[in-house]
């Protein structure tokens, strides 16, 4: 976000020394502008009026390669997974300190989702090398939720603010719903699609969205999107007859956004929005040849990317009111929107004029801004490459040349 600047010119009366006064005014204005530019270097306008300044303080979360997309909750807590050597480790930042959340006995742990209560849902290898779904909290530690009596593989993919978890279990992969009060619930199989499936997402009212993995006549896998509700059970939501469809996000009212392949020779993915009233609606591809949904708010603001035949990509935004719009770049060929918050701020990465990857934040008032230019007292040599997550307060999780960082807005 860039800052608007206000320059105060000295006042004076129109006398015979007016030329000198005018020269003094010009000099003072130039000095004021230079000082304002220096003060504005770490920020940008926030909002449509461009009068509120925002810069970011950097908190280093940890070094290493990122094994899964991080999650940030409303309180600014972060769950993330890093690779170090031959281990994959999950961590939790509580707002003050970073802690290793441990494991169920194995060497690999993945934090897959985080709710506003600070609970993490994920998957850990146990002492026997078997994948097991877990729920973790600061108070209770890591709990194997034992979705399959007698053992067997299980994977926790998402958790809502009520502590309800969804994922898959069994070697043949079946979707489940779990809560502390209700325990494990097998969601069964989708009518007409009795194949391996997994719950991937859920909202606060308990709607679960997932995907079924099928095989074509050549033995190649493809997926179909489904939803589950207590009243309706499992339903195949691909009313457009896509070759492939996958859910990406769910809305507060039970809407599902995702990506579909219309036909084998269609040329690329297309975004969709499903509601119970309208079925699956293709959102189009704008001016490009393909488009993808990467995230959606509970209020149905979508962020993603439009692709062009020549390889260019453009970050995009879609809303029910405004439709699809491209967000531009930082001077290079490519930009990708990765996450969006309820304030309409979108983050991702874009190439600059030199072709280097840079993390960005975008808003309707300020446009796309390089986050590297908005940092306050950043360490020398720090480069933010990819903004991965943002909460409604504007705190951002990003990958950097030093590892994973949290950017807290001032």
Image (cartoon, rainbow, N blue to C red):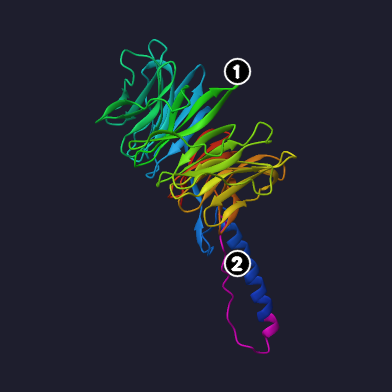
Q: Are marks 2 and 1 in contact (CB under 8 Å)?
A: no
Residue 171: image quadrant is top left
Q: What residue sits 63% from the left and 66% below the top?
A: 31
Q: Name the foreground residue: 355 vs 156.
A: 156
Residue 63 in view here: no
Q: Residue furthest bottom?
A: 15
Q: Name the foreground residue: 407 vs 263.
A: 263
Q: Residue furthest right?
A: 310
Q: Is residue 226 magenta?
A: no
Q: Name the foreground residue: 91 vs 276.
A: 276
Residue 202: image quadrant is top left
Q: Position of residue 192 (x, y in %)?
A: 47, 27
**Quarter of the image with the N terminus in it:** bottom right
Which range is magenta? 1-20
Q: Report the mark closest to the observer, 2 or 1.
A: 1
Q: Residue furthest left?
A: 181
| Picture layout, residue 234 above or below residue 313 | above
């Amino acid at each position: 976000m860039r800052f608007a600047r206000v320059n105060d010119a000295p006042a004076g009366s129109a006398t015979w020394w007016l030329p000198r006064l005018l020269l003094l005014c010009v000099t003072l204005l130039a000095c004021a502008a230079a000082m304002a530019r220096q003060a504005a270097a770490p920020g940008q306008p926030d909002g449509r009026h461009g009068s509120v300044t925002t810069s970011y303080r950097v908190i280093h979360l940890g070094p290493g390669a990122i094994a899964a997309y991080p999650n940030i909750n409303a309180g600014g807590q972060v769950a993330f997974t890093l690779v170090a050597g031959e281990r994959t480790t999950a961590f939790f930042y509580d707002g003050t300190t970073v802690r290793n959340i441990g494991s169920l006995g194995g060497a690999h742990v993945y934090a897959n989702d985080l709710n506003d209560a600070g609970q993490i849902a994920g998957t850990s290898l146990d002492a026997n090398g078997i994948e097991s779904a877990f729920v973790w909290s600061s108070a209770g530690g890591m709990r194997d939720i034992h979705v399959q009596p007698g053992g067997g593989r299980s994977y926790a993919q998402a958790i809502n603010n009520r502590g309800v978890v969804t994922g898959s279990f069994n070697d043949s992969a079946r979707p489940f719903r779990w809560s502390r009060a209700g325990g494990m619930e097998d969601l069964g199989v989708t009518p007409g699609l009795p194949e391996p499936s997994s719950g991937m997402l859920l909202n606060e009212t308990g709607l679960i969205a997932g995907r079924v993995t099928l095989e074509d006549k050549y033995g190649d896998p493809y997926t179909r999107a489904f939803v589950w509700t207590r009243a309706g059970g499992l339903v195949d939501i691909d009313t457009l007859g896509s070759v492939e469809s996958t859910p990406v996000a769910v809305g507060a009212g039970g809407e599902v956004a995702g990506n579909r392949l219309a036909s084998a020779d269609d040329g690329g993915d297309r975004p969709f929005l499903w509601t119970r009233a309208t079925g699956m609606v293709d959102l189009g591809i704008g001016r490009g040849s393909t488009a993808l949904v990467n995230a959606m708010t509970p209020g149905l603001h979508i962020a993603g990317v439009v692709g062009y035949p020549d390889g260019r990509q453009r970050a995009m935004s879609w809303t029910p009111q405004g439709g699809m719009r491209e967000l531009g770049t930082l001077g290079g060929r490519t930009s990708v929107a990765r996450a969006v918050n309820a304030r309409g701020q979108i983050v991702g990465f874009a190439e600059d004029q030199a072709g280097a990857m840079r993390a960005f934040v975008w808003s309707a008032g300020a446009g796309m801004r390089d986050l590297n230019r908005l940092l306050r007292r950043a360490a020398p040599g720090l480069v933010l490459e990819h903004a991965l997550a943002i909460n409604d307060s504007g705190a951002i999780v990003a990958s950097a040349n030093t590892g994973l960082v949290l950017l807290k807005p001032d």
